[in-house]
Structures are given as C-alpha cells and as structure tokens.
Image (cartoon, grey):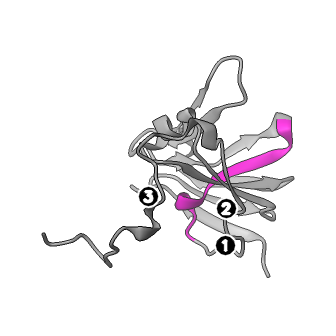
Amino acid sequence: MSHLHTGSCLCGAVKFELDGEFKKFFLCHCSRCRKTSGTAHCANLFAPGARLNWLSGEDKLSFYRLENTNFARTFCSVCGSNMPTDAKSRGLVVVPAGCLDTDVDLTPQAHIFMDSKGNWDTNSNSLPTFAAMPTS
C-alpha cells in the first residue's frame, strides 16, 4: 500500500501531499480540540518521520500555538479548515483526518482526554442516523 496521501482545505486554496505512514489515529476530546473544531473531538493522524509538501496555497496558511504547550494548529486563512502541522521538534506530522482526500487504512485507535470531554458528549450510538440532512 502506498504511503502517499493528498489533502486539501474546504475552499481548495490549500493542497498538500504527505509521504509517510500513519502510525496513530486518536479522537481527542480535550477542551483545546473542542474549541478549535467546534465539535466533540478532533480526529488526528500521527505520521512520524513523514514528509509534508504544500502543493498550493502555502501562503494562505495560518499557524497558532498555545503558549507553553505542545498544542498547535495550522489552518487555511480563507476557509478556516484545519490543515496538517509539521511538528519538526517532535519528529512527526499531525494530520486532521477530515482534510485528507485519500483513504486511510487505519481506524481510530483510542478516544483520548476523556476526562475533559463536554458534558453533552454522550454515547451517540443510540441516536437515529440519516444519510443526509433530515427533512423534519
């Protein structure tokens, strides 16, 4: 299986290629991930030693690092989509799963930071499911 992945932001301004293997896939429920995603968790893939190549839109990227932490986000300054962060000091690339345009052979391995999950973040397996937006 190829370890070459491509991805892009919602508006298409930013496109990238990642050459490397995903070793970890975590659903992070920490308050920082909830704030940056606006959802119950972030779905992040970790690719140690991967090579990240921006194909277009690198000038449209913004970067935020929370002072005195390892928490950082790279995002499209046009549409706000989370993009990969090349954490060179840690020797890995962190890739938000939702920005990938290629399939991933890895499924989530763990829910992490569950002690800080939102009080509304409950087991949703019993909720009704719809293929698209419900009509009523």
Residue 46: x and y, percent? 75, 54
Total marks shown come to 3
Secondary-structure class at tag 1: loop
**Circle 1 sits on which residue?**
104
Secondary-structure class at tag 2: strand
- Label 2 crowding class (10 Å Cα cut-off): few <14, some 14-19, many 20+? some
Q: CA distance from mark 2 to mark 1?
A: 14 Å
Outermost residue to the bottom? 1
Q: Which residues are magenta?
A: 90-101
- Name the residue nearer the viewer: 130 or 67: 130
- Label 3 crowding class (10 Å Cα cut-off): few <14, some 14-19, many 20+? some
Q: Which quarter of the image is occupied by the N terminus?
A: bottom right
Which quadrant of the structure image shows residue 25?
A: bottom right
- Name the residue nearer the viewer: 115 or 107: 115
Residue 79: x and y, percent? 38, 46
Whether residue 16 appears in magenta in the rendering, the answer is no
Earlier along the polypeptide chain: callout 1 or callout 3? 3
**Circle 2 sits on which residue?**
17
Which quadrant of the structure image shows residue 10?
A: bottom left
Name the residue at 41% across, 45% down: 120
**Nearer the camera: disc 1 or disc 3:** 1
Give the numbered dot on residue 114.
none
106 w.r.t. 74: above or below: below
Q: Amino acid at mark 2?
A: Glu
Name the residue at 47% across, 44% down: 37
**Circle 3 sits on which residue?**
12
Q: CA distance from mark 3 to mark 2?
A: 14 Å
Q: Amino acid at mark 3?
A: Gly
Residue 3: x and y, percent? 78, 71
